[in-house]
Amino acid sequence: MVVRLLFSFSKGTSMTPYRNHKHRTVLTACYAAGLRLSETTHLKAAHIDSQRMQILVGNGKGNKQRLVPLSPRLLSELRGYWRATRPSNYLFPGKTPDVPLSGTTVQKACKRAATDAGIRKTVTPHTMRHSFATALLEAGVDLLTIGRLLGHKSFTTTLIYLHVRRPHLGRTPSPLDWLPIRHAETPNPNDQ
């Protein structure tokens, strides 16, 4: 779903490779770093540390700051966007450079992209955050780490975010298979 949504922004012309580069980059950042929409729209260039490959999230819930990993692919996307737009204050400015992009604007763009991509489920920028958490869980990242990356105080809040896909559940092994014991032979009923 994430791929289809982000790809729908790429259906432009050779003159305009992205229908809206800003909206695509915002949604990419929401997914790549598990950021809330408001955290993403309030990012500034100074928050991106390409040396340490970290993003300083300063506009989280309760105005708490946290560091999240900066994906090399996200860094590449952000650099391409920055070179194309040269924002002066917020990375994703609204109508004026001193105001961040409106969350409503991004939500509308996300809805339009989902429709264009043929996605029938409701998709919001927050869906990208949920998808981030689910992808990490399916990759074997522990719940406490996921919770820290999402900026959650409570472990139970993180549990709400996790939606494991059915194929992943079917591949889950039993702990019995890990035990270092031999398989017991089935007794032959004729031997009794």
Image: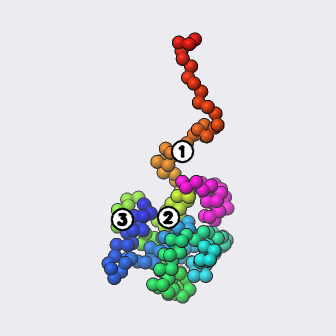
Residue type, numbered disc 2: Met
The residue at the point 47 percent across, 48 percent down is 166
Residue type, numbered disc 1: Thr
Q: Where is residue 105 in the image (x, y as percent from the top left)?
A: 45, 75
Q: Identify residue for label 3.
A: 117
Dot 3: element? loop
- The N terminus sits in image quarter: bottom left
The residue at the point 63 percent across, 37 percent down is 179
Which scheme is used to colour this image of the protein? rainbow
Q: Identify residue for label 1.
A: 172
- Please determine whether, in this image, residue 98 is positioned above or below residue 183: below
Examine the rendering and report whether any part of residue 150 can be seen: yes
Closer mark to the observer between disc 1 and disc 2: 1
| 174 or 89: nearer the viewer | 174
- Please determine whether, in this image, residue 170 is positioned above or below residue 76: above
Q: Where is residue 150 in the image (x, y as percent from the top left)?
A: 60, 64
Check if residue 151 falls in the magenta segment. yes
The residue at the point 47 percent across, 80 percent down is 80
Residue farthest toward the left in the current orientation of the protein: 13
Examine the rendering and report whether any part of residue 104 can be seen: no
The residue at the point 49 percent across, 62 percent down is 127
Mark sitting on residue 76: none
What's the magenta bit mostly, secondary-structure-wise? helix
Q: Position of residue 112 (x, y in %)?
A: 38, 69
Disc on the earlier residue, 3 or 2: 3
Residue type, numbered disc 3: Ala
Magenta residues? 137-160
| Side of 62 relative to 190 (left or right) | right
Q: Distance between the residues labelled 1 and 2?
A: 24 Å
Q: Identify residue for label 2.
A: 128
- Please determine whether, in this image, residue 26 is positioned above or below residue 164: below
Are the residues at dot 1 and dot 2 in contact (C-beta closer than 8 Å)? no
